[in-house]
Amino acid sequence: MIDSHTHLDFCEPPNAELVAEALAAGVTKILTVGTDASSSRDALAAAAEFAAVFAAVGHHPNNATGFSGADRAELRELASDPLCHAVGETGFDQYRDGAPLEDQRLAFEAQIEIAAELGKPLIIHTRDADDLSIDTLRERAEGVRVILHCFTMPTRLEECLAEGWWISFAGNVTYPKATELAEAAALVPDDRLLVETDAPYLTPQLRRRERNRPANVVHTAEFVAAKRGVDYASFDQMIERNAAELFGW
């Protein structure tokens, strides 16, 4: 199984413990995702240290205040590292008062350009900004492989699939009240589906009282496999194949 989106630097145990625990649970690869220049460097360092860890570098919308040409140049340099397999996470967030919308837009558009230039997939965060995110991607990200991380737009699923984007489900798909999200997880085509933890956030229902860890992606995977009516071994192979094609590892 693959954890296609986690934040090792935000998790409390040491990386070595998190990676060992994930490997023991059957997780073969972990994509740890940067949210600013510092955490992106941490992601690259973790990828250099652990064979099972790969990096994404990005500038989260809530960290976009004052995003500048210098920030873009630094991110472009980090993204060109061979250990970087995706750009982001980036997008729009109007849920938290994290950064001015125009700064979020500058950071988002810069990362779309970097992903296009380097031929790497783009990881999207969107919260209370569905129209903004979808419209920007349609206008600017043609030809870019787009991953809608922690997918939360079940009513927009058909639109997103029509654009050819990948859909990634986190632990919140397992929550009892997330019925529309669970139904969406059953409808995504086999070749457009991923699962993730977004650790240390969104712990799956079976472990919900704990902070999330990469090993817990297996619980989300088991839930989604059951919703799709397939056995776990077949689902595991499908996710491994999708991630390998998308991230090029």
Image (cartoon, rainbow, N blue to C red):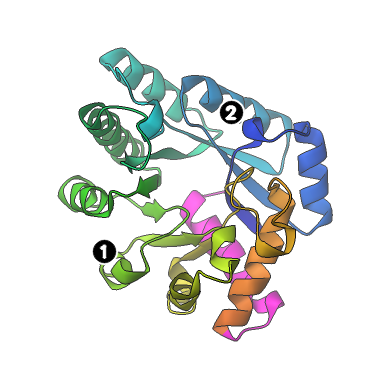
Q: Pick the residue in front: 131 or 188.
A: 131
Badge 2 local density, few (<14 within 10 Å), some, or many (20+)? Answer: many
Q: Does residue 1 appear anywhere in the picture? A: no
Quarter residue 161 falls in: bottom left
Q: Amino acid at mark 1?
A: Glu
User: Where is residue 72 drawn, in percent x and y?
Assistant: 32, 21
Residue annotated with mark 2: 44
Depth check: give the residue in front, 202 or 119.
Answer: 202
246 in the magenta segment: yes
From the top left corner, tell me how far across and down residue 117 is, in percent: 30, 36
Instruction: Give the residue drawn at x 34%, y 60%.
Output: 165
Residue furthest to the left in view is 139
Within the magenta stretch, is there residue 45? no
Q: Quadrant of residue 15?
A: top right
* Secondary structure found at label 2: helix
In this rendering, the count of numbered labels is 2
Q: Is residue 189 above or below residue 31?
A: below
Q: Is residue 130 left or right of residue 243?
A: left
Q: Residue furthest top?
A: 70
Query: Disc 1 to disc 2, how far (Cα)?
Result: 30 Å
Q: Which residue: 64% across, 30% down?
A: 9
Q: Is residue 5 visible?
A: yes
The residue at which mark 1 appears reads as: 163
Question: Magenta span covers which residues?
Answer: 229-249
Quarter in which the N terminus is drawn = bottom right
Indicate the position of residue 155 as horizontal and vertical percent values: 31, 70
